[in-house]
Amino acid sequence: MDFYQTLYFMSVVGGMAGLFTWTLASLACLALAGRGQQWISDLVAAAILGALVGGLAVGFDDHWSGSRVMPRRVIAAVALGIVTGLTASLLGIALSHNLAEHAPGMARVISWMLVGAFVGLAVGLCSRRLSVSTVTHGFTGGLFGGLLGGVLFTSLGSVIPNVSQALAFSFTSAGICAGIALAPALLRSGSLVFVSSGDARAQAKFGRSGKEWIMKPGFSYLIGSEPGQAGRRETEIVIPDAAIAPRHALLFERDGRFYLMRHPDAPPGGSILKIGPQTVVTKRELRHNDDILIGRTALEFVARSESESDSK
């Protein structure tokens, strides 16, 4: 899946999370109807938004990156999303008390921005590719999503209250997820692109989507056929090819250059790993547009700087 597809689907996931949040928040409002406790409804809505956006964003980000979805990371994202959502909502409530009389519209917009930014921060902190940029993009995406959502809610609330609230939740959530999707793509130094595979499972999984794995500075990537084989400092690239070992190869970056090597645990005989026509025996540097054959699967390495200059 390329950058634009990832950005699109992550935004759709965010929008869906927003709609689910609106549905559950509306049910909570009905349960609290007539009690005059609007602040409780706001807290519930913020907690639901944090939980859904956190869990869905982290889970789908893992799935689309080709890595195994780790339940403990999803649970951590849900928990942190709830905490940050509640914290932001409490700050928004305190702010509303000070601004409600003079600028009620601005108070609501700022409240939406706080919730979006804090939940985005939580999702960024739980990202598999944790970095300053991931956290910053999650925070910024949520901030601008919350701004748009708050403006829609404030401007349309008196005309179409239910629709405006649904749109506000959707845009806030979509902004958070778009920010998370943007971070690794903007910082990538290169990418590994699926070309074709002689194994029907790999071809069916990646052939139509044109799967692309983004490479980032300082990260190591384990290429194998089974999930759950990576070490602490490795990110998995799982290719369901019977000719690929569970731990087949390592791709890593050093000083701005990418290298490919056979994994120490790979079987000594019969584990195919080639760059062009040459078999990889020791560490080999990758060049722009290098063809890689691993097992029965063909990949292409694309260096970001070279690909950008080629497109100009």
Image: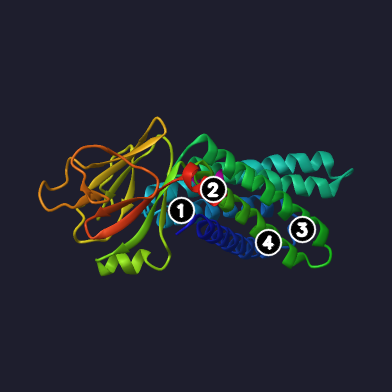
What label does residue 152 carry, if any? Answer: 3
Q: Position of residue 298 (x, y in %)?
A: 30, 58
Q: Earlier in the sequence, mark 2 or mark 1?
A: 1
> Is 307 colored magenta in this rendering?
no
| Camera-side mark, 1 or 4 | 1
Residue shown at 11% from the left, 46% from the top: 268
- Assess whether mark 1 and mark 2 are in contact (beta carbons under 8 angstroms): yes
Q: Position of residue 290 (x, y in %)?
A: 34, 49
Q: Earlier in the sequence, mark 4 or mark 3?
A: 4
> Is 82 colored magenta in this rendering?
yes
Q: Earlier in the sequence, mark 3 or mark 2?
A: 3
Q: Which residue has dot 2 on it?
A: 180
Work out whether 201 lies above or below 143: below
Q: Main secondary structure of the magenta part?
A: helix
What label does residue 160 carry, if any? Answer: none
Q: Earlier in the sequence, mark 4 or mark 2?
A: 4
Which stretch did the figure color magenta?
Answer: 79-83
Residue shown at 63% from the left, 43% from the top: 140
Q: Amino acid at mark 1?
A: Asp
Q: Which residue has dot 4 on it?
A: 29
| Camera-nearest residue between 297 and 166 | 297
Q: Earlier in the sequence, mark 3 or mark 1?
A: 1
The answer for how far apart the CA atoms under marks 1 and 4 are is 31 Å
- Assess whether mark 2 and mark 4 are in contact (beta carbons under 8 angstroms): no
Quadrant in which the N terminus is drawn: bottom left
Q: Amino acid at mark 2?
A: Ile
Helix, strand or loop at label 1? It is helix
| Camera-side mark, 4 or 2 | 2
